[in-house]
Amino acid sequence: MERTVYVNGEYVAESEAKISIFDRGFLMADGVYEVTTVLGGKLIDFDGHAVRLERSLNELDMAAACTKEELLAIHRKLVELNNIDEGLVYLQVTRGAADRDFAYPTDATPTLVLFTQAKPGLSGTAAADKGIKVIAADDIRWGRRDIKTVQLLYPSMCKMMAKAAGADDAWLVEDGFVTEGSSNNAYIVKDGTIITRHLGNEILAGITRSAVLRFAKEAQMQVEERSFTIAEAQAADEAFVTSASTFVMPVIEVDGAAVGTGKPGPVAKRLREIYLEEMRAKAV
């Protein structure tokens, strides 16, 4: 069945959706995006995504296409129209259409596009039970990874590198330290302490990351925000990643070396349980 999508104020069939060939998102990757998870037909951590979207727009001097309240209504309408029980809502805002020029246009109207992806069984995926494998890849992205832009070519390349190596994903390494996964935040667990890179321009401030660390501290788990190496990860007791689409996902192998027992560990399992329980209860 064809999806209904949202384009600049209209709900249309996906085959009828159109934006200008002069849109700066297409020409310049001049846009930002967010992904909000849907569980039980409700939105997970919508407020967190809305706040991060506003920050991304502000960092790029880009105007908002609508208010937070209007965005929430659009999300809910798309979930209803597409009958999404478990899945994702993708949102993209670009600076809009203008004649091609490196300088920002001063009079362009922002482009706003949203669409859904149905993901039945998202919360119960088999990958969470068996864990995933990651490889190391050089982090050669631009220096403002804290802005959630649509510049996703290198992360896509890293996904393909991982696939070619018989793995599931890549952890990016800069100056000898892991920054983050290609589309997620990275963690290790050593002697009961959860270790993940501190926030900065080098990584995205994950919405799921924020919630998981909060839940970990509430559960009296030790958390240390610092850089770590691939070697540390390989010698860790556990490893995992977090993102809106994977929640808490155990990592059982890092660059060819088994982590811990080579199976999902208790910390990642427990955090996934807590996260899903808490976020389902707070979903809107």
Image (cartoon, grey):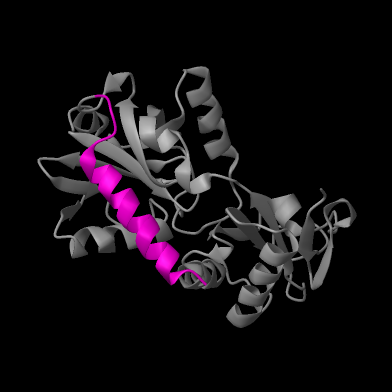
- Give the vertical position of 250 relative to 224 (above or below): above
Q: From which residue to which does the magenta span run?
A: 262-284
Q: Is residue 63 visible?
A: no
- SS assignment for the magenta stretch, majority: helix
Of the pair 90 and 105, the residue shown nearer to us: 90
Task: Report if residue 125 is visible in the image.
Answer: yes
Which residue does the image show at 18% across and 60% down from the upper left? 219
Picture coordinates of residue 36, whole percent (x, y): 55, 60
As for residue 261 lying within the magenta part, the answer is no
Displayed quadrant of residue 11: bottom right
- Is 206 left or right of 191, judged from the image as shown? right
Q: Is residue 16 left or right of residue 226?
A: right
Q: Residue furthest right?
A: 16
- Up-down: is 42 above or below 181? below
x and y percentages locating residue 224 in the rendered image: 17, 53
Which quadrant would residue 169 be assigned to in this image? top left
Is the residue 169 above or below the residue 78 in the image?
above
Position of residue 18 measured from the top left corner of the image (x, y, whole percent): 86, 57
Q: Residue at x 54, y 68 (%)?
A: 53
Residue 268: image quadrant is top left
